[in-house]
Amino acid sequence: MLAAERRNLILETLRRDERVLVGTLAAEFDVSEETIRRDLAHLEELGLVDKCYGGATLADSRNAPPFKVRKKLNVEEKKNVASQVADLINDGDFLMLDDSSTCYFIVRALHGKKGLTIVTNSIEIILELSGTREDWTVISTGGNLNQDVFCFFGRHAGDTIHSFHVDKAIISCTGLNLDGQFTEAGMENANIKQAMMSSAKETFLAMDSHKFNKTAFISVGNLSQVSTVVTNADPGPQWRELLNEHSVRLICG
């Protein structure tokens, strides 16, 4: 097993259990404890875990890891979600996309569409689309620059978003819980997503399956504000029932 694969599995365990022990992981992966310590040190450098005596805990969810880190996590799951979202987009649609790494993969999956208009606060998305599609209109929100997350936020960004009316807002989240609340690590991100939802006819919540049964720092909204949840795996009967209660379409593959 490659180190990157093992580290992703360690993160999955942390998301589920919130704490891991070096000895337990070493036995599970049949590697030395020193190898696991190096894995945890690497994940700590990325801001994903906090090392503690004998193991590690999941890092404070209020501190979102940098975009360059998030872009490398759960890539296949995000590509799966992106492909499914692309199937829901029509030529000529007016869209808003947030600064999530999931939306970065979504916009890459949209290249076969014609005549799209995209409003985004993500610098990565703007760079991805720069000079690639003459028949698309790409609009930046502007605003205050967050250099870690590589996006714009703040009042100016929110005012720009509120000035438009689009067909679909496509957003992701840090966690979705069984109270129907989807949540984010930071207040600025939450404010941007709320503005996008209020400016769209319908909202797609695009998220990999690791985010079910998670709660982050601040609430963004409730499932009643969402038309469709797109994910990479069936979340199970309890979630299907909850989504049906809120009249939310579930698309999973």
Image (cartoon, grey):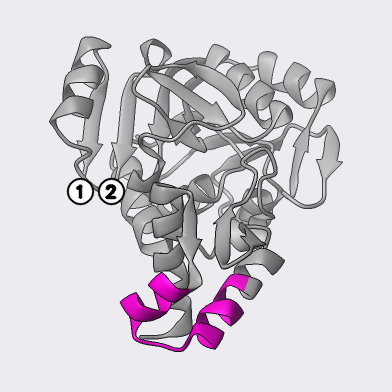
Res. 194 in view: yes
Q: Amino acid at mark 1?
A: Gly
Left or right of 126? Residue 90 is left
Q: Residue 208 at x, y = what percent?
A: 37, 46
Left or right of 55? Residue 62 is right
Residue at horizontal 57 percent and vertical 36 percent from the top: 118
- Confirm or deny contact between disc 1 and disc 2 (CB under 8 A): yes
Q: Which residue is mark 2?
A: 232
Q: Residue 188 at x, y = what percent?
A: 73, 28
- Where on the picture, by quarter, is residue 66? bottom right
Q: Amino acid at mark 2?
A: Asn
**Main SS class of the magenta portion in the image:** helix
In the rendered image, which quarter contains the N terminus?
Answer: bottom left
Q: Secondary structure at mark 2?
A: loop
State the separation of the CA atoms marked 1 and 2: 5 Å
Q: Which residue is mark 1?
A: 253
Q: Residue 108 at x, y = what percent?
A: 47, 56
Which residues make up the magenta segment? 23-40
Residue at horizontal 51 percent and vertical 79 percent from the top: 36
- Where on the picture, by quarter, is residue 199? top right
The one of 51 and 133 positioned closer to us in this rendering: 51
The one of 191 and 7 positioned closer to us in this rendering: 7
Q: Secondary structure at mark 1?
A: loop
Q: Residue 68 at x, y = what percent?
A: 65, 62
Res. 132 in view: no
Mark found first going from the N terminus, 1 or 2: 2
Residue at horizontal 57 percent and vertical 68 percent from the top: 54
Q: Is residue 39 magenta?
A: yes
Q: How many marks?
A: 2
- Where on the picture, by quarter, is residue 25? bottom left
The one of 217 and 27 positioned closer to us in this rendering: 27
